[in-house]
Image (spheres, coloured by chain):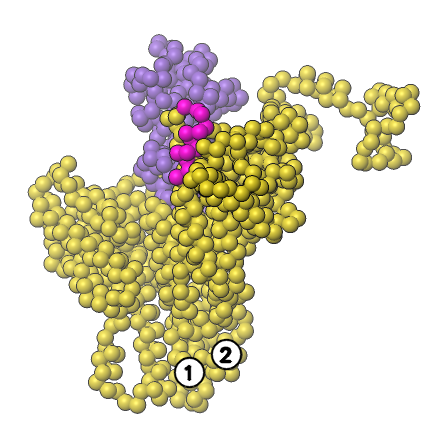
Amino acid sequence: MEASSEEKAEFEEAEIKYVSYEGEHHLPLIMSLVDQELKQAFHKGKCVGTVVCKMGEHRNTFRGYIAMLVVIKPYRGRGIATELVTRSIRMMMESDYEEVTLEAEVTNKGALALYGHLGFIRAKRLFHYYLNGVDVFRLKLLFPRQELHYSVPVMTNRDEVMNMLIWIALEECSGLPYSEERMSC
Amino acid sequence: MADKAVSEEASMDGQAPKPTSIPVTDNTVWADASPLLDAACIGLRYGELIHGDNFNLFAAMSALEIMDPKMDSGIVCRYYSIDEAIENGAAPVPISLDSTIDVQCTIDIMDHLLACEAAWHKGHSLAQTVFSCIYLLRLDRTASHALLHSYGRVIRATCKAVLSVVSDARTHEEEDLFTMTYGLPLNGDGDEKCLSMLNAVEETISRQLRACKATSSKRRVSEDLEPLQYNPNLEEGFCKALLCRLRFRKHFFHVLTCMKRPQGRGLELARKHIASCISELEFILKSAEFLQSCSGESCEDDIDDKTTASGREPIGFDASLNSRLSAPTPPRAIKILSWKKAVEYFVKLLHDLDVICSYSLDPHLENLLRFVVQFQKSQPDLVARSHLQLLLVQDGKLYGRDPIFAVITKAAALPEATKNHDIQKNESILQLGQCYYILQLVMNLLKILCTNAAWQRRKLGKILQDWRVIYLQLELALRNEFGEVSSSSNDENICMKIFQHILIWVEEQTYWIACRFLMLGFELELYSASEYCMVYWYSYAVLIKLAEKTHLKMAVSYDTAKRKGKKKRDSPKDLVRESRIPPAVLFLQCYICLAEGLTMMLAALRNEFMILQSPSPFNTEQEKFVQHFELLQRACIPDHASYLSFKESTTHARFSTLVMYNYFKDAQRIAKEVKSSFSNDPDRLAELRKLEQVAEHNSVALNLICRLGALDPSLKVSFEFSHHPFFATAVVRRS
């Protein structure tokens, strides 16, 4: 099922499922999103949005970084991006990370509002960050300090490069239930 | 085996083996790896990366060089070298055998180069802008074309001059593409004489212009002058178009040379050249009509986007040529400024340079700081800012002229008599290290204040700790050296006085930096409306300290002057002067009242009407407070400014009480009072007027909200920076 980029898609809240990245079989979904192609990916569900994050240590701080967030045009304005980001941040918070950061263009009012509502502040402005001459804000969210305890952040799949965190928003096709496997995070 | 094949081939042909730069030794031999690579290419499918024991995913990803033509075979260029481009006629000399077209194209090249130059100034690399010009890359080729050659030389010399200014300033961190010059031919033999070459060409064309004017009025014309091009009707237009372009280049080069002279000696002359530049730019703009009309092309709608006055595409430019030669690209596609925008850019640059050249080189640090802050309001670009910085700090002296330590003692309001004699005698009191450190702090501060606002704010935040540390060290040294205040020898007393003055000045300066840090946050739009309350509260706390230290410095200075025997006894006039608050402090008090007023109004809005709150699922206001003021808190600026004290100060804010004690009315009163003291200072007068407007509008809004707020839920309050960049004005609307 392909949605024309001009129409806003009609759907109910319950029709969007959020799944965590499970492996390479999800990569084409994410790639197709980035390519802005509305291919039907796999048997069930259409990928309508994704967020790609990185979690790691930076100058003695455990910091999460939101690298990329995309929701295809017909599905924007419905809180999908907020949900994707919220889930990522929650996971970082539960893993005892101290802060989350990302960059957003100063002209990107939508992103600035989204992250502003989630508690991010504009910590810095970076001059001409992108080569088209646009400035960016470095947005930062500081989690409330927990009681001092010596737990180590829980890491899954410690990769030598980085710890990736990816969420995908899939739209259910009518009549087809999701398997349990697909829904697990 | 491949290697056997090669050596066999070599011996069979009887030819020498292929020349290599690495000689073959006993243990090595050259082998042709092409078949192996071909096989590997066939074996690898799209999206696959090589994977080996010593070559993991990380290594493979790191090895990818996207968009670098040397490494990325997917990047296709039209020409793969400058020579290839030239061989294929990309930059013919002369440009055309038809002299009219040759002149037209030359003017197009000049215009496009101006647009490239502006794009370079705006933050792109030389390789993709000015040196996308093939003629410039091989300037010797143009020797037979006087116009192109002399123009090219001046451009090259100009770029080199501008580059050296920006490189010397060394505070262009985020604008680091500007100074990249790998593999570019920036140094030309004889470029110092470029102006004399240009003058010669200018002279020729001037004579030609006179001649063709004389011809049109039917007067006798000299025989030995060759016309520029063959169409006599267009001769005058082309001469004029060329002359203003050549003259602009000449005067601009003079501006750079004059401004480079040490101790600001060339500033007055530079202003004259700046004025000439601006008038030549006006002529250049006017020439567009003529050039478009004879270009023969139809008037297009997007003429404004073109990089030439005529609207034609210039000959002889190819940005991709340099991508193979210069590191550390991959080059991104950039947009050269339109010709119109380029001219606008240069007009602005010249105005900014003119402001710098008009500066009086005031030896008083506080006046200098105010000048720099004022200058930055026009958002000058990198080139202008670098020129300012080099003017201010030269050879470790202010303007290359005033020793920084003398500047500091003046700033610390040490009486005239104290300075040279006593300080030199008592050099040891300020241990040499601390002395040196303070000088470095001041020079560093001046340099930072000349950078772009975003970078500037980050650096100001970082140096707060340095200033705090030096203050603590000085305070400790003062206590250790002098213990209690005693009336011992006069010398010791003078030492202590010097110490005291400098200590107070260091603290005042620290709070000044903190203030600038906070205010820049508004300019850079770092605060959201729900954070204004805490920002104004913190600013209020810092401003109070700043006013206190400024006042203290002036009081101590007066006291010191008295003790030195300047005042025999306290005359009534002296007593009045002592009790009168200095205008500079009153100015700050105006700020303080506005800051307090805004803090309380915003707090009351939140407390009573629940607006301007921003509840977040992941953190609270406290985390935002901690983040915004982290650098200030770390440097204890000021002491006891914590989130808790912020909450305590604002929890009970209510409109009913605010209306009774109206901080905005106080601000209005002070602003009015202090205006007469600044009658010679137009900038401060202008600001006082703005502060009055802010106070007035906010006072009205306060009263309105107090009267109607609870009754009329349709009232909406927003805060806009319509009068002052730092103090917001409350706007009350009905939705």
**Residue B626 in the image: x percent, y percent?**
36, 51
Q: Nearer the viewer, residue B661 or A177?
A: B661
Q: Position of residue B396 (x, y in %)?
A: 53, 66
Q: Position of residue B174 (x, y in %)?
A: 49, 46
Figure quadrant of residue B563 = bottom left
Q: Nearer the viewer, mark 1 or mark 2?
A: 1
- Residue at the disc numbered 1: B417
Q: Chain of mark 1?
A: B
The answer to whether residue B321 is seen in the rendering is no
* Magenta-colored span: B286-298
For the residues beneath circles 1 and 2, the answer to whether they share a chain is yes
**Which residue is the site of mark 2?**
B429
Along the polypeptide, which appears first: circle 1 or circle 2? 1
Please tell me the colour of chain B: yellow
Tag of residue B405 = none
Q: Is residue B493 visible?
A: yes
From the viewer's perspective, is B413 left or right of B710?
right
Quadrant of the snapshot with the N terminus of chain B: top right
> Judging from the image, what secondary structure is the residue with disc 1 in?
helix
Gap in Å between the C-alphas at discs 1 and 2?
Answer: 18 Å
Where residue A184 sits, quadrant-wise, is top left
Q: How many marks?
A: 2
At 43% from the left and 78% from the top, the residue drawn is: B498
Query: Chain letter of disc 2?
Result: B
Name which residue lies at 16% across and 54% down. B696
B453 falls in the magenta region: no
Q: Which chain is purple?
A: A
Residue drawn 15% across and 36% down? B735
Task: Name above or below for residue A84 compared with residue B712.
Answer: above
